[in-house]
Every structure is written in structure tokens, then in C-alpha cells.
Image (cartoon, rainbow, N blue to C red):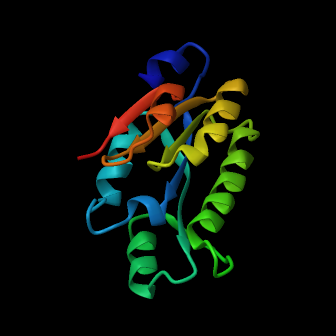
């Protein structure tokens, strides 16, 4: 558990940055509950950054639901060819900001996508605790093996 690992190093509750790969995990087939997700992540510390990354075609209703659940909706403005990879790049760049932020102790990536493996690796190199949250089918084994903690949602 992260709190146990960080307890001796910190004189405060760990600060957490959460990045949600919207196109990958906010789908009807998964029925992701952001309130329940926030509760699960609170086990690792206090959420200081919470962003859900969406493509430019996200509905206003979805954006409102994300904001009402305490997360920031971050819209990737990509080209027509590969909208999902544009969101991935935007999310990875934002997560790297947290990797180099001395006020953040824990990086949480909510995704099934192995594209975020370099973010997890760089976070660990920089002394951050890492958590990946995902679900089957398609939850990257490499991502799970690289992370300090894994939460698999049903």
C-alpha cells in the first residue's frame, strides 16, 4: 500500500495526480463510476490533480458529468486521422508535468493502454509511487507489471 511506503518519508498525506484516459475507459461497456474511482484512489492519498481526457467530440452532457464528479475535463484537440492517439499524447504530456512536480507523490493512470508505460517508468525513476487502474478486456500486462500498484475495476 502506498501510504505505508510513503509514511516514513512524508510528514503529510501523499498528494496524488490522477489522469483518466477517457476514450479508453469511459465507455458504456465499462460503466466507469468516477465517484467510486475517487474513493478507491483516496486510499493512496489526497487528490490534488484529477483530469479526464476526452476527444473533441465529447458531449456537453459527458463533460458536465465529469465536472460534477470533481474532475477536470481536458479536451484534446486533434486531427481527424487518429483522435484517440491525440488524446493519449495530451494526457501523457500532462502526466509528465506531475512526474516533475515536487508537490506530487503518487501518479495514477486510469487506462488499459500500454502507450502510457513510459510515463509510469519515468515516474518511478523520479521517486513517484505509481498506480494503474484499468479493466478487462485489454488491460495491458506490461503496464500492470511496471506499476507499483494495480487496481482492476470490474
Which residue occupies 65% across, 67% down?
Answer: 86
* Residue 32 appearing in the image: yes
| Residue with the most extreme left position | 154
The single residue placed furthest to the top in the displayed view is: 8
Residue 17 left/right relative to 39: right
Q: Determine whether 90 is above or below 1 in the image.
A: below
Image height of 112 relative to 6, above or below: below
Residue appearing at x 29%, y 59% in the figure: 33
Residue at image location 42% in from the left, 70% down from the top: 66
Q: Does residue 74 appear in this view?
A: no
Residue situated furthest bottom in the rendering: 60
Q: Position of residue 55 (x, y in %)?
A: 55, 75
> Looking at the picture, how far across and down is residue 83, in whole percent?
59, 73
> In the picture provided, is 28 more to the left or to the right than 84?
left
Q: Judge by depth and name the residue closer to the eye, 95 or 64.
A: 95
Q: Quadrant of residue 118?
A: top right
Is 95 situated above or below 4? below
Q: Residue at x 61, y 16 (%)?
A: 9
Quarter of the picture holding the N terminus: top left
Q: Position of residue 143 (x, y in %)?
A: 50, 35
In front of the other: 153 or 4:
153
Q: For residue 32, which quarter of the picture?
A: bottom left
Q: Is residue 69 left or right of residue 101?
A: left
Where residue 124 appears, x then y in whole percent?
Answer: 65, 27
Amino acid at each position: 500500500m502506498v501510504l505505508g511506503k510513503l509514511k516514513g518519508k512524508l510528514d503529510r498525506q501523499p498528494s496524488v495526480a490522477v489522469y483518466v484516459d477517457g476514450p479508453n475507459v469511459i465507455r458504456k461497456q465499462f460503466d466507469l463510476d468516477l465517484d467510486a474511482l475517487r474513493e478507491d484512489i483516496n486510499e493512496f492519498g489526497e487528490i490534488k490533480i484529477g483530469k479526464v481526457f476526452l476527444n473533441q467530440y465529447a458531449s456537453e452532457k459527458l463533460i458536465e458529468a465529469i465536472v460534477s464528479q470533481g474532475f477536470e475535463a481536458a479536451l484534446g484537440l486533434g486531427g481527424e486521422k487518429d483522435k484517440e492517439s491525440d488524446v493519449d499524447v495530451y494526457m501523457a504530456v500532462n502526466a509528465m508535468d506531475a512526474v516533475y512536480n515536487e508537490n506530487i507523490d503518487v501518479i495514477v493512470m486510469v487506462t488499459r493502454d500500454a502507450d502510457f508505460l513510459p510515463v509510469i517508468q519515468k515516474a518511478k525513476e523520479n521517486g513517484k509511487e505509481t498506480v494503474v487502474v484499468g479493466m478487462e478486456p485489454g488491460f495491458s500486462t506490461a503496464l500492470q507489471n511496471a506499476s507499483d500498484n494495480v487496481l482492476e475495476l470490474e
